[in-house]
Amino acid sequence: MPRSPRPRSSGIRRWRRCRPQALHRPPRRIAETKTGRPVAEATGRRPREIDLNTVDDANLLLAEGGLDFHIPSLSEFFPDAILFAGTPFEFNRVQLVRLIVLAVVLITMSVVAARARLVPGKAQSIVELLIEFVHSSIIENTLGMREGRKFAPMLITMFFLIFAMNLAGVIPGLNLAGTSVIGLPLLLALWTFGTYVFFGVKKHGLVGYLKHETMPPGVPKPIYLLLVPIEFLQVVLIRWASLTIRLLANMVAGHIMLVVFIGLTQAMLFSGSWLIAASPLGGALAIGIYGFEMFVAALQAFIFTMLSAVYIQMATSDEH
Amino acid sequence: MLLAEEEVSGTRLLIPAPSEIIWTAMFLLIFALVFMKFILPRLNAVLEERAQKIEGGLRKAEEVQEEADRLRADTEQELAAARQEAAAIREKARQDGARILEEAKARAEAENERILTAGQQQLLAERQTVLTQLRGEVGSLAIGLASKIVGESLRDDERSSRVTDRFLADLESSQLASR
């Protein structure tokens, strides 16, 4: 894909296109979209935009009664740059969401921490409740009290970051989870990967660690032929890849579901036909999924942290 | 068309762009640093301090409870001892009282006896004196009277005393008889 510098106004125009208004723009004729590149050139857009922006041209569903509903596509997760377009520091809406969440969480938590008292106030109680939850239900259950103390800061940080970034997906105005684009889940998973490899090697030595992880005792010798490659692959790839994909896919799917149901409800409500009658059902489903996404935000943060703790425990344990 | 386009985006979903990695790494680093270097240590310090306070408070409460128990036991012991002592004192006082009463009674009886005896003795002595005196006086009086009547001096002392004695003996016997 070409990455030539483009005029600044184009960035802003494309940013506007990603906003919800894009969902109910007057439908274009399908024929126009099928022509592809020539049309794009005719309208002054570059080919890459056409490739990526499924929102405005393709997937236009023209149902009976003039239902104007765009099936949301994955381009939702790759909005156009806001700043530094074309450089490696391209700053788009996802980064903006992350930056806002980061700032809000860090400032709030810093204020709470700075004002922390022996007799906690409401905010401090909630924060302490969350920390206590991570401590008791994740760290002590997997790593135990002694080992847990060493990894508690990392795991609590992970939990708070993932939880906050996940929640951004259901916060009006942000509307996109910070973990729904691969960078954050991937780096978090690599953090876990690096931690368990580092402390595993530190404890058992490189060879000892590999033996510890790939050759569980109590298995007949020939089975090792099969087991060692599988376990090795699991240690070096599958664990962190599955952590990444689990979190990413959950957030992507959640966002798509929300967009589908909210968009559908809106499209039915303004369809001007008998479909208006069905819009309350769509609305109820959208609200239900909204609540479900809050639950998923907490659940995925919990699972990610829990699995990280389990992997670290497996790497640093004395025996299987 | 639709499938093809989603497939393109789908692979893109799993392959991070350089900018994505750069920004995310920056955010992650900032978040982790602030969280692990400032927020968590501060909160943990407060949590630990609270745990210590509670633990200390519990231990202190235990100590105070023990102290109170000990004091109460002491007090009860002292109270029991005092009660016992009081009972002993009361008992002793009762016995003393009885003894004193007994003694006083004995002393009073003895005194009574003594006074009675002394009185009797004095009475006897006085009676003896009176008798002797009376005998002398009555004798001389009678002899004088008789001398006057008889006209003869009964000077013979021996006789006079004999006569007096006889008279008195008669008198006594008549007195006894009349009694």
Image (cartoon, coloured by chain):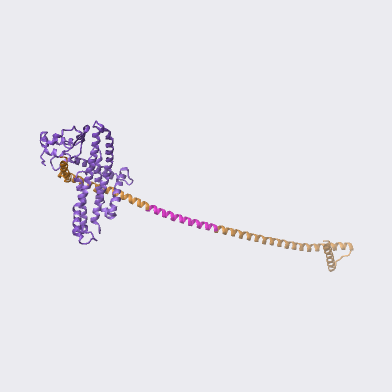
Q: Nearer the viewer, residue A292 or A80?
A: A292
Residue that appears at 20% across and 52% down: A238
- Residue at x 22% of width, y 55% of height: A199
Most common secondary structure along the magenta stretch: helix
Task: Name the foreground residue: A119 vs A255.
Answer: A255
Relative to A201, is B75 on the left or the right? right
- The single residue placed furthest to the right in the displayed view is B150
Residue A28 lies in what quarter of the image? top left
* Residue B84 on the magenta segment: yes
The answer to whether residue A212 of the structure is visible from this angle is yes
Is A221 in front, or is A175?
A221
The spot of residue A188 in percent (x, y) is: 21, 48
Residue at position x 29%, y 46% in the image? A130
Spot the orange chain and give its letter: B
Vertical order, A161 against A196 (above or below): above
Magenta segment boundaries in residue numbering = B59-87
Locate the N terminus of chain A by quadrant. top left
State whether residue A174 appears in this view. no
Residue placed farthest to the bottom in the image?
A: B158
Query: Is A23 situated above or below B73?
Result: above
- Pick out the residue farthest to the top: A272
Q: To which quarter of the image does residue A40 belong?
A: top left
In this rendering, the answer to whether A164 lies above or below B56 is above
Q: Indicate left or right for A188 with B149 as reference.
A: left
- Is B68 in the magenta? yes
Q: Position of residue A274 (x, y in %)?
A: 26, 32
Give the x, y percent position of residue A235: 20, 54
Which chain is depicted purple?
A: A
Quadrant housing the C terminus of chain A: bottom left
